[in-house]
Image: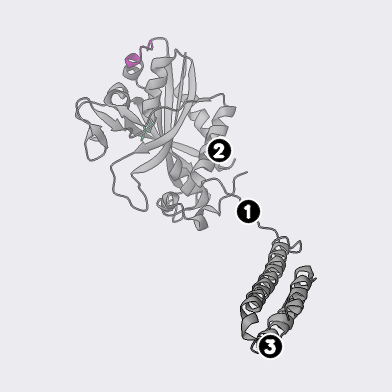
């Protein structure tokens, strides 16, 4: 019997197979209920008492070795199949989703592009500002309501540090830091303490424009804005200027464009007037020039400012400003930049 066991151990150690089915066949052959090793255990009952210890030991070895061998072969095949599944060449590739630009960025870039062709440079500056750059230098009287807590987010009082309520603060920063001629636009985020609704948000984006040189006139402002409106909304677009008021411009105006949806006939977007307001503008107030040490007798200039969300909403017919801040992928995916 010892000889038989030793031969089997030898035989099993040399076994090689080519498929998972072969492994199962081997298991049945050696370890199955009616298998060779089970039969040996049957025979073991008849082994004389004095040989039991020695034969029992080898027989147990044989069984463990056979089990280990079969487990090894099995795991080899399993590993092979799962690895080959991983490199299934017929499988479809994983498609990467390509992000798209946010509509506010698309419109901002378009506006910057139009003004850069007109020779405007671009400047950005701080969002946390002091009272001087947001209000005082811009000719806001001390009791002006915009300085009120209701409109402005203050970070500290005395000295007043606040979140800028408009990008006009960058006008001042630029005029303080470089001599005329200045021809620049200033895009950026602004903050106002307003209730959030479909039409207003406490954070939004503006682009301000500033042109300071000798002999800059209101006619220059009007022509610049006409070119901008036609580039932005189409060549058929017309503009109209209505008198308005800003502390830092004199005279001041608000600009409307002919409604791009109904072409001026009257619709829900333009509230049946045929016109939609898109920006504020005016000739830079001489007091502002003086605050920035620019000689008001030599230089004059114009400034204008617009809300980027407003332009985006008009162009894309978005009826709720909150959509621009929620960042819902289903909304954002619809905008493709070129
Ligand atoms: N700063 C103004 C606003 O926030 C817009 C403006 C800019 C008006 C420049 C005139 C000139 O409403």
Q: Position of residue 247 (x, y in %)?
A: 30, 27
- Numbered tag placed on residue 110 in the rendering: 2
How far separated are the C-alphas under marks 2 and 1? 27 Å
How far separated are the C-alphas under marks 3 and 2? 92 Å
- Numbered tag placed on residue 238 in the rendering: none
Does the numbered disc 1 mark a residue whose Cβ is under 8 Å from ligand 1? no
25 over 180 or under it: above or below: below
Q: Earlier in the sequence, mark 2 or mark 1?
A: 1
Label 1: element kind: loop
Q: Is residue 24 magenta?
A: no
Outermost residue, front side: 50
- Nearer to the camera, 56 or 137: 56
Q: Is residue 293 magenta?
A: yes
Chain part drawn in magenta: 290-296
The total of numbered circles placed on residues is 3
Q: Earlier in the sequence, mark 3 or mark 1?
A: 3
- Nearer to the camera, 2 or 84: 2
Please state which of the two labelled residues, at mark 3 or mark 2, is closer to the viewer: 3
Q: Position of residue 83 (x, y in %)?
A: 70, 62
Answer whether labels 2 and 1 touch (C-beta < 8 Å).
Answer: no
318 over 4 or under it: above or below: above
Q: Position of residue 310 (x, y in %)?
A: 44, 44
- Numbered tag placed on residue 43 in the rendering: 3
- Residue located at (51% from left, 46% from top): 102
Label 3: element kind: helix
Quadrant observed for ligand 1 in the rendered image: top left
Q: What residue would you read off at disc 1?
A: 96
Q: Is residue 146 left or right of residue 96?
A: left
In the picture, the quarter occupied by the C terminus is top right
106 over 132 or under it: above or below: below
């Amino acid at each position: 019997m010892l000889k038989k066991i030793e031969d089997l151990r030898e035989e099993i150690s040399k076994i090689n197979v080519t498929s998972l089915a072969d492994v199962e066949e081997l298991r049945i052959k050696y370890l199955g209920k009616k298998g060779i090793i089970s039969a040996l255990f049957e025979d073991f009952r008849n082994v004389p008492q004095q040989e039991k210890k020695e034969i029992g030991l080898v027989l147990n070895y044989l069984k463990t070795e056979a089990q280990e061998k079969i487990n090894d072969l099995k795991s080899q095949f399993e590993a092979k199949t799962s690895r080959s599944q991983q490199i299934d060449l017929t499988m479809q590739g994983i498609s990467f989703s390509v992000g798209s630009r946010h509509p506010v960025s698309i419109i901002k870039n378009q506006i910057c592009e139009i003004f850069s062709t007109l020779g405007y440079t671009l400047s950005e500056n701080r969002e946390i500002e002091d009272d001087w750059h947001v209000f005082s230098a811009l000719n806001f009287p001390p009791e002006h309501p915009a300085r009120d807590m209701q409109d402005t987010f203050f970070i500290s009082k005395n000295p007043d540090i606040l979140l800028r309520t408009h990008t006009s603060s960058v006008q001042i920063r630029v005029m303080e830091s470089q001599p005329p001629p200045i021809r620049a636009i200033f895009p950026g985020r602004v903050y106002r303490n307003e209730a959030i609704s479909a039409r207003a948000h406490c954070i939004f984006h503006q682009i301000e424009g500033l042109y300071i040189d000798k002999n800059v006139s209101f006619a220059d402002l009007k022509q610049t804005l006409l070119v901008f409106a036609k580039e932005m909304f189409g060549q058929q677009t017309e503009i109209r200027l209505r008198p308005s008021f800003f502390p830092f411009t004199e005279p001041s105006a608000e600009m409307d464009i002919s409604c791009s949806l109904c072409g001026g006939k009257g619709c829900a977007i333009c509230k049946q007037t045929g016109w939609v307001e898109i920006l504020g503008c005016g000739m830079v107030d001489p007091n502002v020039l003086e605050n920035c040490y620019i000689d008001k007798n030599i230089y004059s200039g114009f400034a204008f400012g617009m809300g980027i969300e407003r332009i985006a909403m008009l162009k894309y017919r978005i009826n709720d400003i909150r959509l621009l801040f929620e960042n819902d992928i289903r909304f954002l995916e619809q905008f493709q930049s070129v």
